[in-house]
Image (cartoon, helix red, strand yellow):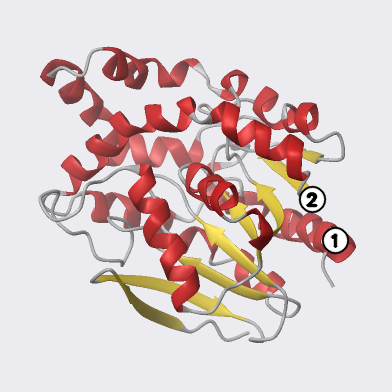
Amino acid sequence: MTVPYRHAVVDGIEIFYREAGRADAPALLLLHGFPTSSHMFRELIPLLADRYRIVAPDLPGFGFSDAPAAEQFKYTFDNLAGVIDRFTEAIGLTRYAVYVFGYGAPVGFRLALKHPERITAIISQNGNAYHEGLSEGWNPIQAYWREPTAEHRWALRNFLTPETTRWQYVHGVRDEALVAPESYTLDAALLARPGNDEIQLDLFLDYASNVALYPDFQAYFRRHRPPTLAVWGRNDPFFLPPGAEAFRRDNPDAEVRFFDTGHFALETHAAEIAAAIGAFLGKHLA
């Protein structure tokens, strides 16, 4: 399966994306999280592209998309979602299922709030929308929300080190040898670009806006009942299993599957997750 690497310019920002599958097939938009990029989907895309049009962009400031300086682009989740919204329009995505992970969840859920008629299904892979899904790993970031001081901001630089990036990939994994080293090595290299640390610290601060929107996201789930599949790494140190189970509270038809792995579940369970997605979308998309 060929996976072309493309670019689209949105608001003067060049967005890198991976695309595969027939242009007329049902569309699936893949939205990555922190600190990664569309590279996290490298194993998943070929497993689904025989049936679906797959589009996986890098968010501004991540991967191979442009990372404009903070003076030119305010790094908030509202702005990330706005760019991705206009990106979907630029490449002709009018209706699509969305796969959300980490930071991709508040971006994707904002798209759903704005355009519920465009969303055909939601797949959440450790993409949280509930308070009970937040672990104690968020405590230092929440301290920054409560008191956005220079001291609290500086303390969060520990999240940007190569050691912490690797730890996010291997924590909760049964066999670390199953995690490709280029995954966390690429992320660490891109985080180390001049100025990217400030981008990430700005987004840590603005993540509070996502938590504030949880009631709105949940109201969307209750009102629109989009077909929903939660595929969750059970040992995620940031987003706990109750966050996956909570989707059923607002959408009783939501399907929940757990896998014995960590935050980056695709690193070890891409085939199993692809099979679950294929069966799920097969029931809900033509």
Residue 130, image x, y percentages = 60, 26
Q: Secondary structure at mark 1?
A: helix
Q: Earlier in the sequence, mark 1 or mark 2?
A: 2
The quadrant of the image that shows the C terminus is bottom right
Label 1 belongs to which residue? 284
Residue 74 in the image: above or below residue 25: above
Q: Is residue 72 visible?
A: yes
Residue 160 in the image: above or below residue 119: above
Residue 64, image x, y percentages = 31, 67
Q: Is residue 233 visible?
A: no
Label 2 belongs to which residue? 227
- Identify the amino acid type marked 2: Pro
Q: Nearer the viewer, residue 259 or 241?
A: 241
Q: Secondary structure at mark 2?
A: loop
The quadrant of the image that shows the N terminus is bottom right
Residue in the picture at 25% in, 26% down = 156
Contact, CB < 8 Å: mark 1 with mark 2? yes
Residue in the picture at 37% in, 43% down = 77
Q: Is residue 187 left or right of residue 38?
A: left
**What is the tally of numbered marks visible in this picture?**
2
Residue 81 in the image: above or below residue 242: below
Q: Is residue 258 left or right of residue 182?
A: right
Residue 59, image x, y percentages = 37, 58
Q: Quadrant of residue 126?
A: top right
Residue in the picture at 40% in, 31% down = 209
Residue 35, image x, y percentages = 37, 46
